[in-house]
Amino acid sequence: MTSTVVIDKAGPTRRVKYGSMSRDRAWALRWSYFFLGLFAIFSLVPPLYMLITSLKSSAEISAATNPWWVFHPTLSNYVELLTSNQFLRFFWNSAWVSIIVVTITMLISVPAAFALSRMRFWGSATLATGVFLTYLIPDTLLFLPLFKMFAAFSDWTGIQLINTWYVLLIVYPTLTVPFCTWIMIGYFASIPKELDEAAIIDGASWFQTLTRIFIPVAMPGLIAATIFAFTVSWAQFLYPLVFTTSTDQLVMPVGIITTLIKGDVFNWGQIMTGALLGAAPPLIIYAFLMDYYIAGLTAGATKG
């Protein structure tokens, strides 16, 4: 009598856990919402406190009451600032400086980025890296040499640049041009090479290739660079603090601090109001153009 041995080649059975992926995803979403909530609280509490303080009178701010509640709301801080010629002068100085700096920055950055990314001349890669490295130099290291340069220029020519708002048109591009050029290099590099090759075959010059083909295609990158240059110009504090002192030459960030803080007296209501009003233009721009800004920065981060 013979016996037959049957070997199970299927191996040990393994219990499949159905729904494990969905549970992992659910936990990932919970942690994401937890940290996003913490980040939102951390980011939104200061503006909320500024808004609450801006709606209080000086007497209520100095009173020993709950700082997170407005017992007697008032718009007097907003009315006083918006009807103040001095505050309006700060606002117009900031607006003019930001608009002109953005224009100067884009006029320099776009042709420079196009040349460095598409024309491929000798040393273009090294020069592109050098442009970005200049952005890494902080303004705290640059303001002293720049101040000495302007002082020497004034001694040689008799032209006084320091203590005028238009000196900011010269120093702000040292911050905006390198990074905007780097953003545009990345965006131009993401455009297919066939486009400019076809344009050159059709007889287009480099200038026509840039203005008629690349600029329309690279519009998200242009918007991202423009928003960055405007934000830096609008919120810059150190350079206007160093290069401007007269009240009629100040821009908003420095004007608010230097005129609303007198000795050891802090006019907190108007300071918070001025800070909120000063933050309004960038917030409005970001609210409408956030998608373009993200698209431009993403392309600049992955190409180049």
Image: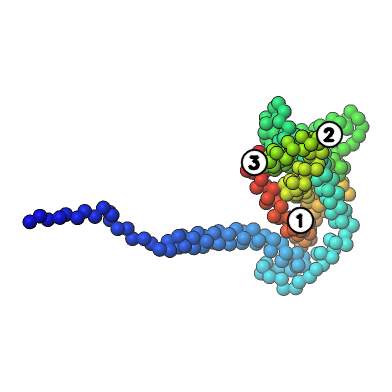
The quadrant in which the N terminus is found is bottom left
Q: Earlier in the sequence, mark 3 or mark 2?
A: 2
Q: Earlier in the sequence, mark 3 or mark 1?
A: 1
Mark 1 closeness class: few <14, some 14–19, many ≥20 residues within 10 Å:
few
Looking at this rendering, what residue extends furthest in the front direction? 1
**Callout 1, which amino acid?**
Ile
The quadrant in which the C terminus is found is top right
**Callout 3, which amino acid?**
Lys
Mark 2 secondary-structure assignment = helix
State the residue at coordinates (67%, 51%): 294
State the residue at coordinates (26%, 53%): 9
State the residue at coordinates (28%, 54%): 10
Mark 3 secondary-structure assignment = loop
Mark 2 closeness class: few <14, some 14–19, many ≥20 residues within 10 Å:
some
Q: How far apart are marks 1 and 2 (CA)?
A: 33 Å
State the residue at coordinates (84%, 45%): 100
Mark 1 secondary-structure assignment = helix
Q: Mark 1 points at which residue?
A: 285
Q: Mark 3 points at which residue?
A: 303
Asked whether the viewer can see residue 190, the reply is yes
Position of residue 35 in the picture relative to residue 205 (left or right)? left
Numbered disc in front, either 3 or 2: 3
